Image: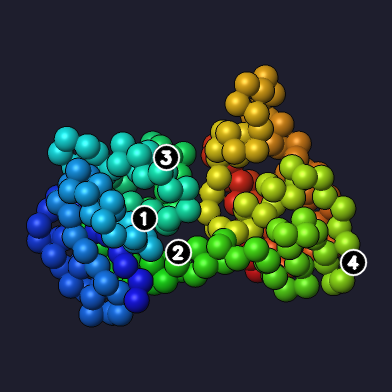
Amino acid sequence: MFKILVVEDDRDINRSVCSFLNENGYEAIGCLGAEEAYDRMYKTTFDLIISDIMMPKVDGFEFARTVRSLNNDIPILFMTARDDLASKQRGFRLGIDDYMTKPIDLDELVLRISALLRRFKIASSRRLEIGDFVMDADERSASLDGEDIPLTAREFDLLYKLLSYPKKTFTRTQLMDEFWDVDTQTSTRTVDVYMTKLRAKLADCHSFEIQTVHGLGYKAVIK
């Protein structure tokens, strides 16, 4: 059974979300703030985190930043009353995976959770198969309909990252931080160059596409 941590300072919302998730096959544990959540995370391994943004002492942004410094893989879903673009951009730049605006439709929340957990399982695998396209992280190989596609090490890493988290937007800065040296003087626009090269090499692949997210970065969308 998947374990979900719900970090929400509104007791009624926390209780209703946890109850609904528990009724739908998950084990949900509620915390009223980030400090309590940290204690829970030290004792229990969770599969997904749902967090509010506006919380006392430690807000959701700082909480997400701390979680990402400790665990780069666990899915994080923001559940918040803040529906402005700036908050969404900040959240995704910190590495969250999804964003829902209150009031929450609990049935939709379950669908979002299911999708995130499915992506996480794919990301945990060392082999990706999307239609006729295959990537093998152990062999560092990529092929389309059985034909090898020559990718540089960085092209491979960038593409594997995007395909591991379908529909998740990665900012140029996030990709630079992960796949370029910390002291690099290269502009984030270098990421654009690599995406152009990848699109050219994958021109015959129709199972997915690399989409530009205006003002943010890139995401892979499976067709």
Q: Which amino acid does label 1 sit on?
A: Leu
Residue 137, above or below 115: above
| Residue labelled with disc 2 | 116
| Residue labelled with disc 3 | 69
Residue depicted at 15% across the width and 68% down the height: 16
Mark 4: secondary structure: strand
Find residue 77 and name its label.
1
Q: Is residue 108 visible?
A: no
Q: Nearer the viewer, residue 29 or 175?
A: 29
Sequence-wise, the earlier of marks 1 and 2 is: 1
Q: Which amino acid does label 4 sit on?
A: Glu
Q: Among all residues in the image, which is located at the extreme front?
A: 43
Mark 1: secondary structure: strand
Find the distance from the CA under tag 4 to the CA under tag 1: 38 Å
Q: Please tell me in which quadrant of the rendered image residue 171 appears.
A: top right
Contact between labelled residues 2 and 1, with CB atoms less than 8 Å apart: yes
Nearest to viewer (mark 3 / mark 4): 3
Sequence-wise, the earlier of marks 1 and 3 is: 3
Find the distance from the CA under tag 1 to the CA under tag 2: 9 Å
Image quadrant containing the C terminus: bottom right
Residue depicted at 40% across the width and 66% down the height: 112
The colour mode here is rainbow
Q: Which of 132 and 69 is in front in this view?
A: 69
Whether residue 160 sits left or right of residue 121 in the image: it is right
| Residue labelled with disc 4 | 147
The picture places residue 148, in percent across and down from the top left corner, at 88, 62
Q: What residue type is labelled 3?
A: Ser
Residue 121, above or below 39: below
The picture places residue 204, in percent across and down from the top left corner, at 84, 62
Find the distance from the CA under tag 2 to the CA under tag 4: 31 Å
Mark 2: secondary structure: helix
